[in-house]
Image (cartoon, grey):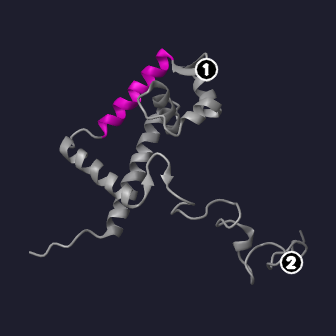
């Protein structure tokens, strides 16, 4: 019997599909409680349930997510440290219980094997799941409206690319004269 190894493209598609579905499910669960998944992660870091590596700076400097958690009555400042209120602890318990329910019915041995396999794949790809891809940039490529991103005016349409002064849509040209 000749068994071929799985196609890396197929594995990548399956991981992406499952990752997106899981992200959306977790976001729905959190949204029902008026929390973004990143806010849930902050609650877990404050409570010590989540490794705060990479979040320590955010917890120190504060920000809009922490302000929102204070406004919702889920955390409070105790001297120089954040701590969960009783409502925050109850919210985090509820969200973690719902998340654990997603894995119900999957044998523990299979989940452990999956975790080991994902760790090996992350190591091979030189990825730290707490920080993303190591080194310069990421595999996702340019994003957004900044220089060289997909919406960068220099990369747009026109005979020479872009919508700037060199492109066919230069200010003061064409029917709109803007």
Residue 135 drawn in magenta = no
Task: Point out the stretch of residues depicted in magenta.
Answer: 85-102
The disc label shown at residue 174, or none: 2
Q: Mark 2 packing: few (<14 Cα in 10 Å), some, or many (20+)?
A: few
In screen coordinates, is 68 left or right of 113? right
Q: Is residue 103 above or below residue 167?
A: above
Choose the circle earlier in sequence order: 1 or 2: 1
- Specify the farthest residue to the bottom: 159
Q: Is residue 93 above or below residue 132?
A: above
In screen coordinates, is 135 left or right of 6? right
The Cα atoms of the two marked residues, 1 and 2, are separated by 60 Å
| Element at label 2 | loop
- Specify the farthest residue to the left: 1
Give the percent coordinates (x, y) of residue 74.
Answer: 53, 21
Q: Name the residue nearer the viewer: 101 or 138.
A: 138
Q: Mark 1 packing: few (<14 Cα in 10 Å), some, or many (20+)?
A: few
In screen coordinates, is 157 left or right of 43? right
Question: Mark 1 sits on what residue?
Answer: 80
Give the percent coordinates (x, y) of residue 102.
Answer: 31, 40
Where is the C terminus found, in terms of image quarters?
bottom right
- The image quadrant of residue 127 is bottom left
Label the magenta part by its dominant secondary structure.
Answer: helix
| Element at label 1 | loop
């Amino acid at each position: 019997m000749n068994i071929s190894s799985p196609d890396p493209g197929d594995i990548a598609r399956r991981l992406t599909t499952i990752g997106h579905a899981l992200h959306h499910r977790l976001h729905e669960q959190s949204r029902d409680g008026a929390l973004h998944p990143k806010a849930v992660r902050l609650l877990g870091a404050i409570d010590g349930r989540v490794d705060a590596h990479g979040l320590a700076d955010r917890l120190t400097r504060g920000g809009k997510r922490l302000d929102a958690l204070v406004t919702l009555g889920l955390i409070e400042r105790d001297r120089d440290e954040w701590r969960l209120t009783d409502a925050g602890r109850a919210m985090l318990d509820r969200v973690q219980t719902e998340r654990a329910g997603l894995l119900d019915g999957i044998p523990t041995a299979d989940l452990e094997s999956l975790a080991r396999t994902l760790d090996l794949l992350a190591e091979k790809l030189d990825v730290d799941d707490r920080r993303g891809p190591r080194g310069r940039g990421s595999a996702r490529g340019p994003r957004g409206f900044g220089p060289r991103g997909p919406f960068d005016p220099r990369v747009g349409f026109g005979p020479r690319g872009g919508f700037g002064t060199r492109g066919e849509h230069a200010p003061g040209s064409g029917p709109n004269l803007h």
